[in-house]
Amino acid sequence: MDSSSPIGQFEVSATDGHARAGRLHTAHGSFETPIFMPVGTKATVKAMFPEELQSLGAQIILGNTYHLHLRPGEKIIKKLGGLHKFMNWHGPILTDSGGFQVFSLSKLNKITEKGVEFRSHLDGNKHFISPEISMQIQMDLGADIIMAFDECLPHPSPKEKIIESMDMTYRWLLRSKEAMTRKESLLFGIVQGGLDLELRRRSMEQITSVELPGYALGGFSVGEPIHMMHELVKVLGPEMPANKPRYLMGVGTPLDLILSVDSGIDMFDCVMPTRVARNGLLFTWQGKVRIKNEKYRTDEGSLDPDCDCYTCKNYSKAYLRHVFIAGEIISCRLNTLHNLYFYEQLMMRARNAIREGRWESFRNDCLTRFASEERSS
Amino acid sequence: MDSSSPIGQFEVSATDGHARAGRLHTAHGSFETPIFMPVGTKATVKAMFPEELQSLGAQIILGNTYHLHLRPGEKIIKKLGGLHKFMNWHGPILTDSGGFQVFSLSKLNKITEKGVEFRSHLDGNKHFISPEISMQIQMDLGADIIMAFDECLPHPSPKEKIIESMDMTYRWLLRSKEAMTRKESLLFGIVQGGLDLELRRRSMEQITSVELPGYALGGFSVGEPIHMMHELVKVLGPEMPANKPRYLMGVGTPLDLILSVDSGIDMFDCVMPTRVARNGLLFTWQGKVRIKNEKYRTDEGSLDPDCDCYTCKNYSKAYLRHVFIAGEIISCRLNTLHNLYFYEQLMMRARNAIREGRWESFRNDCLTRFASEERSS
């Protein structure tokens, strides 16, 4: 039984090449890996009810510490019984540290060894987050997986800046771990080091020297050419501790996911499938579809004949185009539902392929499908 | 069996005072009256899936001829199998004639005996709708109930203009009936006549002299003081043919519905519950709630303890406030779902009260509840 397994236990049940299939146990149940985690920035995965997420195969979702801290505030959420109860999602939740948003969204941030002072992007009010405060916020939210507070540098950054930053990220990890007092929450450390393999390895050595239930690769998807990420993950993935879940933060496209699973990565999150869905870009097993395209105006076919999601089973491309162009809320719903279903199906098929020893052929099939441009049909 | 009853058959199973409970049979099944019909303007009831509408008690929905004619066009919808299939709603659909929107939304409309020339509010293109064209559009959509093409005057209008207009509406009804060639569709006539009781009676005499499966009161909710509508409906409702469904178009608040049922009205539609939901105004059995109110910031209670809808069963007022202020799509969904559930519950309770001979006490209880201002709790 999952529920009797200790919190934090991670079992790798199958490997095929570097790809692995496993299971991580949390205080709100376990989830299978490789897994894609939909992003619920402000205590909702945009356009979706929690029950829909569950039925499309989502096993764990993300919450954003920065956004929830600013509004409605973690103390209110704690008073109301925690993030799970607040947003009506009863499976595992991972929260990020707030670091990424502090550096990318907030204004006038000022970084010292102690932490980061910044102004809210909502109202300009001054805030301060340190490793200790980030841990306290995430514990107040009641997250099952808590991310250490790290510094995220933009790309490109000078080498000495990267070294300085990753050394501080290591010291912040020690403080994050020290501040963790909630035994139901699992702390993951974050490897930084820019796009330099040696620095990445040095950061990995620092971060993995701290005994933790999981490790992440951070600082990717910050504007670098995507092939540089793929090349680094290809080397770094297999070098990460084999007995712990490996999480590639903020990534990515279906192609990114397949390549990263191939490099031994277990966990992913990204706003992309939900964000582009709202803009009418849909992922299918035949390639990408821009639903506003004139050619779908009278197309009575389903979006993806190889998809069993609610959208594909009940609506024509002509309808999806109509409601997208009309700016109807149902368009966001149908598109988001489909894209998330596609991502979860991709991960489920990946798990099955790994378990059944046919990862290589599955991977190659995916690479062929996703490397091509938008389908012309 | 409903399905074996002839299309258009209307049975009044109970009366209590002027209030009545009945059932109308259509080509897509029957529905109980009194009934509230959610408005699906552009082939979607905003923010809702058809299955959700069904499960919250909606038995028939509306489509808007004007909007669907302009985009995507009824010929495309017909080619795709009709409006039911297009939008994945398999119960009865009523379409309006397009008249109301031609007069209120479009630009530069020019009315002659033949019909109305107007420019689309979307792109300024010129269009022409006549009674014959309106019937053809609604038949192409495959509507179960089709509304006659009428002229809607603004309030106030001079008496001679009202007379001229209602006389033309009568002639247009004769042409509408003549143009109806689809036996699965039921044509309803529309009584006009402004706010003058004698003109209304004259229009009713004209319209009901045409044998039709149902009759409507149009031209209300056009800016007149609401008590004037209530007073007229109180007289006119009971004078409408007793053996046919009576439909009060575009109305209204919970109070309007109860007062109108009390006057023998059977059918209602209004964008109000869905529109105000998206603006954070919620109907409850304790009165109206503006969810953005600061007092709900930490309120862990449900929106309405007397409501069994998904929103009330799963979320706190604090969450509803948070997602409303954050502008999240889930706010539109949760609020719309609740308001529609409230309206359908109101009608269901009304039907039960009529059937059980306790309409008067139910009506009085509702009047007390809905006449009061927003609750202060």
Image (cartoon, coloured by chain):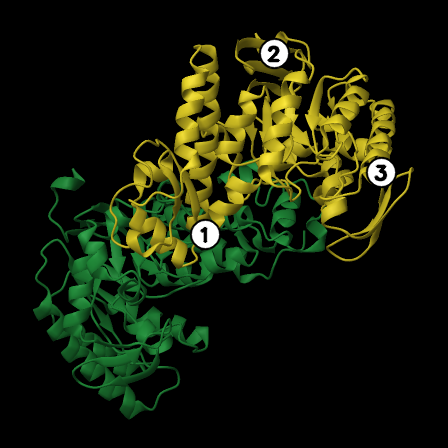
Chain colours: A yellow, B green
On screen, residue A362 above or below B372: above
In terms of depth relative to the viewer, which is nearer, B196 or B147? B147
The reply, left or right, for residue A284 in relation to residue A25 is: left
Task: Identify the residue position indicated by label 2 in the image.
Answer: A3
The number of numbered discs placed on residues in the rendered structure image is: 3
CA distance for labels 1 and 3: 48 Å
Q: Which mark is residue B89?
A: none
> Circle 1: is it few (<14), some (14-19), or many (20+) Cα within 10 Å?
many
Residue B375 place in picture, x, y as percent: 63, 55
Quadrant location, the N terminus of chain A:
top right
Name which residue lies at 47% across and 32% down. A343
Q: Position of residue B170 (x, y in %)?
A: 17, 78
Q: Amino acid at mark 3?
A: Glu
Nearer to us: label 1 or label 3: 3
- Among numbered discs 1 and 2, the one appearing first in the sequence: 2
Labels 1 and 3: the sequence-earlier one: 3
Say if residue B311 shows up in the picture. Answer: no
Toward the viewer: B282 or A110?
A110
Identify the residue under disc 1.
A329
User: Which dot marks residue A160?
Assistant: 3
Say which amino acid is labelled 1: Ile
Q: Position of residue B73 (x, y in %)?
A: 25, 62
Contact check, label 2 and label 3, Cβ < 8 Å: no
Q: Residue at x 41, y 61 (%)?
A: B271
The answer to whether residue B189 is above or below residue A212 is: below
Residue A255 position, x and y percent, is 49, 32
Query: Marks 1 and 2: same chain?
Result: yes
Q: Chain of mark 1?
A: A
Residue type pointed to by label 2: Ser
How many residues crowd mark 3 within 10 Å: few (<14), some (14–19), many (20+)? few
